Image (cartoon, grey):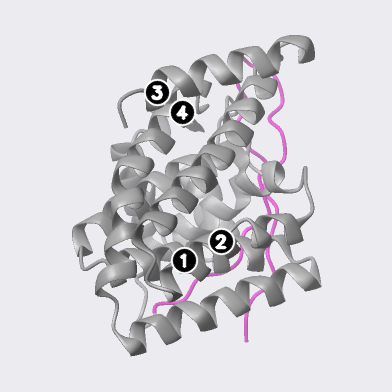
């Protein structure tokens, strides 16, 4: 039986009372996922949901208590996030979430463009019947999740579809790289950014891409992937700019500038 999440107080920063830490689920060792990986997933979801915020201090002990687990897997999971530059430790004080900058977001999506555009072209050419069937099924799952309005399920289905296309292209290293890049942008608050538009629109944005892959139209698949990632980049860069309190009348201009500089040559 799963223990209900327990909110705890974050340690104080600069001597002031700390904000409430997120209510995190209990974690249990399974054959499919280590405790450290589950801790990483729980922290990631808390951040995307806005329950953990950049700039606030949290402690290993408090997260361990909230998730009903020892400090070791929590520390291991956080160290992995730290290695990816997603959290910053403060000696004897705890850790904080690192704010992802607009430039970071633009550069991450530019790297994804460099990887996923040719992967879409290769998937259209190389995917076997079973792989294409899995792509179609995942595409349908994406639309089903969007119809229910479930943001988290839609985001997971979106990620699953991109993963299947990368696998169909035959490059396992690209799969791992893109997963790490997506994790970084999730720390910006991808769910919050997605909520700025209907999830049905997010699902429809994949339609031209999937249809091109299923039709084995290589150039159309590459073009659709490029357009999809550019759209995603511009939304997330704009979201990062707003998180920095950028005046709204400058968001469009700065978004275009950041994305153009990052993607030039790709």
Report the magenta residues as a range: 1-29
Report whether 3 appears left or right of 101: right
Question: Is mark 3 in CB contact (under 8 Å) with mark 1?
Answer: no
The residue mark sitting in front, 2 or 4, is 2
Mark found first going from the N terminus, 2 or 3: 2
State the separation of the CA atoms marked 4 and 3.
6 Å
In the image, 105 versus 217, the foreground residue is 217
Q: What residue is disc 2 on?
A: 208
Q: Which disc is residue 106 wearing? A: 4
Task: Give the Cα distance between marks 2 and 1.
Answer: 6 Å
Magenta run includes residue 15 = yes
Q: Nearer the viewer, mark 2 or mark 3?
A: 2
Q: Which residue is mark 1?
A: 212
Q: CA distance from mark 2 to mark 4?
A: 23 Å
x and y percentages locating residue 38 in the rendered image: 44, 65
Which label's residue is closer to the chain start, 3 or 1?
Answer: 1
Indicate whether 149 appears above or below 238: below
Residue 69 seen anywhere in this rendered image of the structure: no
Q: Nearer the viewer, mark 3 or mark 1?
A: 1
Label 3 near label 4: C-beta < 8 Å?
yes
Disc 4 vs disc 1: which is toward the camera? 1
Q: Residue at x 62, y 41 (%)?
A: 189
Question: Residue 264, how many percent across, how many down?
Answer: 36, 23
- Do we see residue 231 in this rendering? yes
Q: Which residue is mark 3?
A: 262
Kindly identify the residue that appears in the image at 64 percent across and 13 percent down.
Answer: 253
């Amino acid at each position: 039986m799963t223990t209900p999440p327990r909110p705890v107080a974050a340690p104080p920063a600069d001597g002031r009372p700390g904000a409430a830490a997120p209510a995190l689920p209990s974690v249990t060792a399974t054959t499919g996922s280590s405790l450290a990986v589950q801790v990483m997933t729980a922290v990631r979801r808390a951040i995307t949901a806005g329950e953990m915020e950049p700039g606030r201090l949290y402690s290993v002990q408090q997260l361990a208590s909230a998730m009903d687990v020892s400090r070791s897997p929590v520390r291991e999971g956080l160290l992995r996030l730290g290695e990816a530059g997603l959290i910053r430790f403060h000696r004897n004080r705890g850790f904080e979430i690192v704010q992802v900058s607009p430039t970071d977001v633009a550069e991450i999506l530019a790297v994804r463009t460099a990887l996923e555009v040719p992967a879409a072209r290769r998937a259209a050419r190389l995917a076997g019947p079973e792989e294409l069937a899995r792509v179609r099924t995942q595409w349908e799952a994406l639309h089903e999740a969007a119809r229910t309005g479930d943001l988290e399920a839609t985001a997971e289905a979106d990620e699953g579809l991109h993963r299947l296309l990368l696998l169909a292209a035959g490059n396992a290293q690209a799969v791992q790289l893109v997963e790490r890049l997506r994790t970084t942008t999730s720390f910006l608050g991808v769910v919050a950014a997605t909520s700025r538009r209907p999830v049905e629109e997010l699902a429809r944005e994949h339609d031209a891409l999937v249809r091109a892959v299923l039709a084995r139209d290589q150039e159309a698949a590459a073009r659709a992937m490029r357009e999809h990632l550019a759209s995603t980049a511009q939304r997330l860069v704009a979201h990062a700019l707003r998180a920095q309190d950028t005046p709204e009348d400058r968001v469009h201009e700065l978004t275009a500038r950041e994305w153009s500089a990052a993607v030039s040559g790709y």
